[in-house]
Image (cartoon, grey):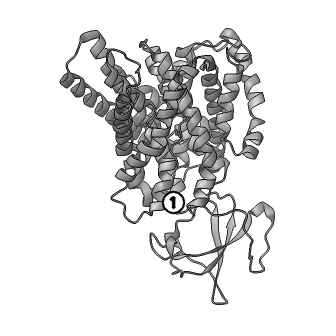
């Protein structure tokens, strides 16, 4: 399906044009409720959609093709926004592990989870090909959902050590395309078995070729359009921020739209374009661009979660609740930790605590539910049961992992506490400039080195002063720190 086909969809049908703004109007105030309860906001959006659906208030919505088209368009916007905000300079120290997690880590998740699902003999989406059906289910749920991770990390203002925020955001943004391609690989493999009775070796060869083609073409198209975008931005020099934002988005959507007919991955293409544009040295209207696409991201992910919630049928879920709980617990406590620790084994400088927290941030969200629509649209037998399982696993992941991210980060001593007793060294600052906090350096923080630059402070944190042995020192990047040093830091927004 072409990712831009959403524009040809009749959004007025079934009063959807009236329904969605009404749901958005109700959903936005839920962000306040979610912050007070400590629940991920996107979880509340899903629950609201379910409450308004056929088993709730009676709003009947079952257009899976339309939902898939809207969902893919929304995912493109989300990945475009996250790519624009990803800084290669800040991500460089954790780039290798992020890329491995989004590739090798996803493969390991599919292999381990699919094997365990097959061993517990749970019925798959394709009764004639149970093993492939188990791996299809695993592929659908293999990625960490970018919308969920961004929402939780930024909504709860988690400020993490060891550049974990950069690693987790890059991983969650780049592994969605990989999970999508693997899902399509297993969908096609099942179709080959059921329609043509293809041999095992033919299926393997076809799957490997399809995967490599999707990734290679997606990257190539994205790389080509990124160069075209950078050249155009430098030559045209638009003076209007809104027009510039529309121009930049059009290039990204063009890359994604062209990648599909060329047998490439549209999500990967648009993500590459966004990464390259976002890392231009002199990107015009950078601040306005980020704010605009941040708002667009909230809108499209809210709409996507609401629509996917409307598709859910709670009355059909009790029958799959037990296997879904078993699969969710296996993924949270077994396959995700195993895949993370195996993938990150070569990175010995990365602390055990950081690897443990990375394994805990395996949040599911709209991505897996969206990918679960693929077998439904393809007409697989039992696909509605598979959709219900993925929906239940997603809800459990958002509750168990999403609601415990902040406590887990504090328990592992990986977050900067926002509410400690503060020693401000007599310095005062207006509240609008940020919060003053003091931080005592421990030897455990010298993972990457003992200079201030090596601390890899999270986005929005700045060191104002260093106190050592009763003396006050002016901080700089190459300053060598010692265990017991007191840092006066300001926590707030930053433009870089």
Which residue is label 1 attached to? 163
Q: Position of residue 111 (x, y in %)?
A: 33, 37
**Local crowd size for mark 1, using a 10 Å CA cut-off: few (<14), some (14–19), many (≥20):** many
- The vertical placement of 15 against 460, above or below, is above
Residue 457 drawn at (x, y percent): 56, 65
- The foreground one among 366 and 245 is 366
Look at the numbered disc 1 and give the secondary structure of its residue. loop
> Does 424 appear above or below 359?
below
The quadrant holding residue 490 is bottom right
Question: Can you give x and y, in whole percent of width and height, for residue 64 in the image?
Answer: 54, 15
Question: Where 147 falls versus 101 (above or below)?
Answer: above
Q: Residue at x 47, y 45 (%)?
A: 333
Q: Residue at x 35, y 42 (%)?
A: 108
Q: Is residue 207 left or right of residue 297?
A: left
Q: Please give left or right for residue 2 compared with residue 153 in the image.
A: left
Quadrant position of the C terminus in the picture? bottom right
Whether residue 370 sits left or right of residue 50 in the image: it is: left
Residue 13 location, x and y as percent?
A: 66, 9
């Amino acid at each position: 399906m072409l990712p831009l086909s959403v524009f040809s969809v009749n959004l007025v049908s079934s009063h959807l044009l009236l329904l969605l703004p009404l749901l958005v109007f109700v959903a936005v105030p839920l962000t306040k409720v979610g912050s007070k309860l400590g629940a991920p906001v996107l979880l509340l959006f899903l629950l609201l959609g379910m409450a308004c659906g056929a088993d709730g208030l009676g709003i009947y919505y079952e257009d899976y093709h339309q939902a898939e088209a809207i969902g893919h368009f929304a995912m493109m916007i989300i990945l475009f926004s996250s790519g624009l905000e990803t800084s290669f300079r800040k991500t460089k120290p954790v780039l290798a592990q992020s890329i491995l997690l989004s590739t090798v880590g996803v493969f390991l998740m599919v292999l381990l989870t699919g094997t365990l699902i097959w061993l517990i003999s749970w019925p798959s989406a394709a009764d004639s090909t149970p093993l492939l059906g188990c791996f299809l289910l695993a592929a659908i749920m293999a990625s960490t959902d970018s919308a969920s991770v961004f929402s939780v990390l930024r909504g709860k203002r988690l400020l993490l050590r060891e550049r974990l925020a950069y690693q987790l955001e890059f991983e969650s943004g780049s592994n969605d395309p990989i999970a999508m391609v693997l899902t399509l690989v297993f969908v096609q493999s099942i179709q080959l078995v059921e329609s043509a009775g293809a041999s095992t070796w033919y299926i393997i060869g076809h799957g490997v070729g399809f995967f490599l083609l999707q990734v290679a073409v997606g990257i190539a198209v994205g790389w080509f359009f990124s160069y075209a975008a950078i050249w155009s931005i430098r030559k045209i020099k638009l003076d209007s921020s809104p027009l510039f934002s529309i121009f930049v988005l059009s290039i990204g959507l063009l890359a994604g739209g062209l990648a599909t007919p060329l047998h490439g991955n549209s999500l990967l293409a648009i993500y590459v374009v966004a990464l390259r544009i976002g890392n231009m040295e002199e990107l015009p209207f950078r601040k306005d661009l980020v704010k605009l696409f941040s708002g667009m991201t909230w809108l499209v992910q809210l709409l996507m979660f609401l629509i996917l919630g409307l598709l859910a049928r709670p009355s059909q879920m009790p029958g799959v609740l037990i296997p879904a709980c078993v699969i969710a617990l296996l993924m949270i406590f077994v396959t995700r930790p195993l895949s993370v620790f195996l993938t990150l084994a070569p990175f010995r400088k990365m602390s055990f605590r950081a690897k443990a927290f990375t394994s805990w941030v395996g949040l599911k969200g709209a991505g897996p539910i969206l990918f679960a629509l693929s077998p439904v649209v393809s007409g697989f037998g039992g696909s509605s049961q598979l959709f219900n399982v993925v929906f239940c696993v997603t809800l459990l992941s958002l509750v168990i992992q999403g609601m415990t991210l902040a406590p887990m980060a504090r328990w592992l001593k990986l977050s900067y506490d926002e509410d400690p007793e503060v020693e401000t060294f007599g310095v005062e600052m207006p509240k609008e400039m940020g919060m003053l906090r003091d931080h005592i350096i421990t030897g455990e923080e010298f993972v990457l080195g003992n200079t201030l630059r090596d601390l890899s402070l999270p986005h929005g944190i700045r060191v104002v002063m260093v106190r050592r042995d009763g003396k006050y020192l002016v901080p700089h990047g190459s300053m060598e720190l010692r265990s017991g040093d007191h840092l006066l830091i300001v926590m707030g927004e930053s433009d870089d």
